[in-house]
Image (spheres, helix red, strand yellow):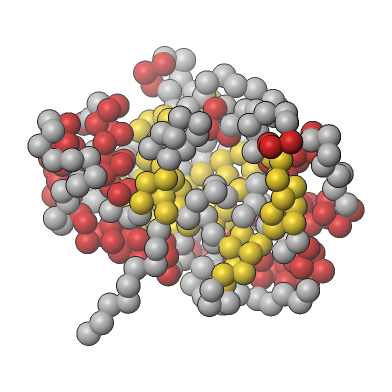
């Protein structure tokens, strides 16, 4: 098939926006008080969890949704008052803030509304290990929902940097330089759900899928592609697939494309999985359990917000 470049604000280079504040939203003192008040109201049963009262912060979060749906596809919200809250209150804050951006998508076999991202000592080399269960490096990938949100409750002692890249920019670079490999991404690839060793754990889907308006949805996870090779009925990678993955790894780790964020306490990162790939450096934790790295992960579905009319 013939593939073409994708135009729009979802194409950006990390080297060009690294020093910009356009992708940051800093909460002021009034916003932080509003979060604390809303959390306490939900905790006390004065308001339902899905009605997180945010009269001044709500419009800010709607602009976040607009940027995710129709802009560059990522936003870093800074200043969530996690240090003034218990772990349960942090959960309520994450759910309440994310609920203003999109609909909460359940995660995991227990269909939990959020997931705790921390090192459980799991071996990253094991096929059933999930990426949020260990402290090792994570390659660039996308999560299986419209948006992933991460609220940093505590950072690691060192490392654990979040890195993102515009999958639209990577796609367009492939189209310009290796259109044959770009076309290959639109064909079915074997993936691993890591739900077991039976055939139900393995499935096929393209890495790139056309979207309305001449866009593209880029769904990539090299670890899950490689672990699919354990399936007895899964064919080995073709030389062209190996070449495509090697090139994707080189591009996503190229300093021109990548943007690195050092998530600190109270930072909440929102990423559109259709147009942004994300990864993480390995990290070292504090020895004390109460000081160890702890993030809250939420998956969201998001509809493009309606266009404003005069």
Q: Nearer the viewer, residue 13 or 173?
A: 173
Toward which corner of the image does residue 62 lie, by quadrant? bottom left
101 relative to 63, above or below: above
- Numbered circles on residues, count: 0
Q: Position of residue 258 (x, y in %)?
A: 58, 55
* Outermost residue, right side: 239
> Going by the image, does 285 lie left or right of 188?
left
For the point 17% across and 51% down, which residue is it?
A: 54
Q: Position of residue 273 (x, y in %)?
A: 52, 55
Q: Is residue 301 visible?
A: yes
For the point 57% across and 53% down, which residue is it?
A: 277
For the point 30% across and 49% down, which residue is it?
A: 99
Q: Quadrant of the N terminus?
A: bottom right
Toward which corner of the image does residue 267 lie, by quadrant? top left
Toward which corner of the image does residue 247 lie, by quadrant? bottom right
Q: Position of residue 227 (x, y in %)?
A: 74, 36
* Outermost residue, top side: 288
Q: Quadrant of the C terminus?
A: bottom left
> Going by the image, does 83 lie left or right of 13?
left
For the point 60% across and 21% down, which residue is it?
A: 122
> Going by the image, does 160 lie left or right of 52?
right
Q: Is residue 178 visible?
A: no
* Outermost residue, left side: 46
17 relative to 227, above or below: below
Q: Nearer the viewer, residue 221 or 230?
A: 230
Q: Position of residue 129 (x, y in %)?
A: 62, 28
């Amino acid at each position: 098939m013939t593939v073409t470049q994708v135009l729009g604000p979802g194409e950006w280079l990390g080297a060009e926006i690294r020093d910009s504040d356009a992708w940051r939203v800093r909460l002021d003192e009034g916003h932080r008080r509003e979060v604390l008040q809303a959390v306490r109201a939900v905790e006390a049963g004065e308001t339902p969890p899905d009605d997180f009262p945010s009269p001044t912060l709500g419009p800010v979060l709607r602009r976040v949704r607009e940027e995710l749906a129709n802009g560059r596809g990522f936003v870093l919200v800074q200043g969530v008052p996690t240090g003034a809250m218990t772990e349960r209150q942090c959960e309520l804050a994450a759910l309440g803030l994310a609920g203003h951006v999109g609909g909460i998508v359940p995660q995991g076999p227990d269909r939990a509304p959020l997931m705790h991202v921390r090192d459980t000592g799991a071996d990253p080399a094991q096929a059933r290990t999930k990426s949020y269960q260990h402290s090792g490096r994570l390659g660039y990938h996308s999560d299986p929902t419209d948006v992933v949100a991460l609220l940093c409750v505590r950072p690691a002692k060192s490392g654990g940097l979040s890195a993102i890249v515009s999958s639209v920019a990577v796609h367009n670079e492939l189209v310009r330089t290796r259109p044959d490999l770009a076309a290959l991404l639109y064909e079915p690839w074997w993936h691993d759900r890591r739900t077991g060793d039976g055939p139900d754990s393995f499935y096929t889907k393209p890495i790139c899928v056309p979207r309305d308006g001449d866009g593209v949805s880029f769904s990539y996870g090299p670890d899950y592609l490689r672990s699919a090779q354990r399936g007895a009925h899964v064919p080995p990678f073709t030389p062209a697939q190996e070449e495509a993955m090697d090139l994707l790894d080189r591009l996503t780790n190229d300093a021109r494309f990548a943007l690195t964020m050092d998530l600190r306490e109270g930072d909440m990162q929102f990423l559109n999985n259709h147009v942004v790939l994300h990864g993480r450096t390995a990290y070292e934790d504090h020895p004390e359990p109460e000081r160890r790295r702890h993030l809250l992960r939420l998956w969201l579905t998001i509809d493009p917000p309606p266009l404003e009319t005069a």
